[in-house]
Image (spheres, rainbow, N blue to C red):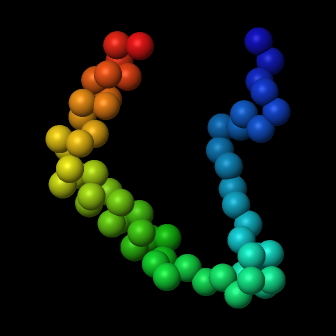
Amino acid sequence: MADRKGDDLRYSLDDSKIREHLGYAPRVSFTDGLAATVAWYRAHRSWWEPLKERAKLR
């Protein structure tokens, strides 16, 4: 089966237009945001582990 258009192994984003036209600036750096996200998932295993188990049953 052929891949769907846009079904890539990775995606990259360019926020230059939103920065230029709307004055967007992230409040949290990518590195800090990623670290905070990983910390949240580590601290809340009881939230995501049941979801992971349910996904295995499908």
> Horizontally, is 31 left or right of 43 in the view?
right
Query: Toward the viewer: 8 or 17?
Result: 17
Image side of residue 35 versus residue 50, left or right: right
Snapshot quadrant of residue 34 = bottom left
- Relative height, residue 21 to residue 50 (above, below): below
In this picture, residue 42 sits left or right of residue 30: left
Work out whether residue 21 or residue 10 is closer to the camera in this orientation and state it: 21
Q: Quadrant of residue 12?
A: bottom right
Q: Residue at x 78, y 27 (%)?
A: 4
Q: Quadrant of the C terminus?
A: top left
> Toward the viewer: 51 or 12?
51
Q: Image quarter for residue 3?
A: top right
- Residue at 80% x, 83% y: name it: 21
In this rendering, the count of numbered labels is 0
**Residue 8: x, y in percent?**
71, 37
Figure check: 45 above or below 53 = below
Left or right? Give the position of 3 relative to 9. right
Residue 31 position in % (x across, y down): 44, 70
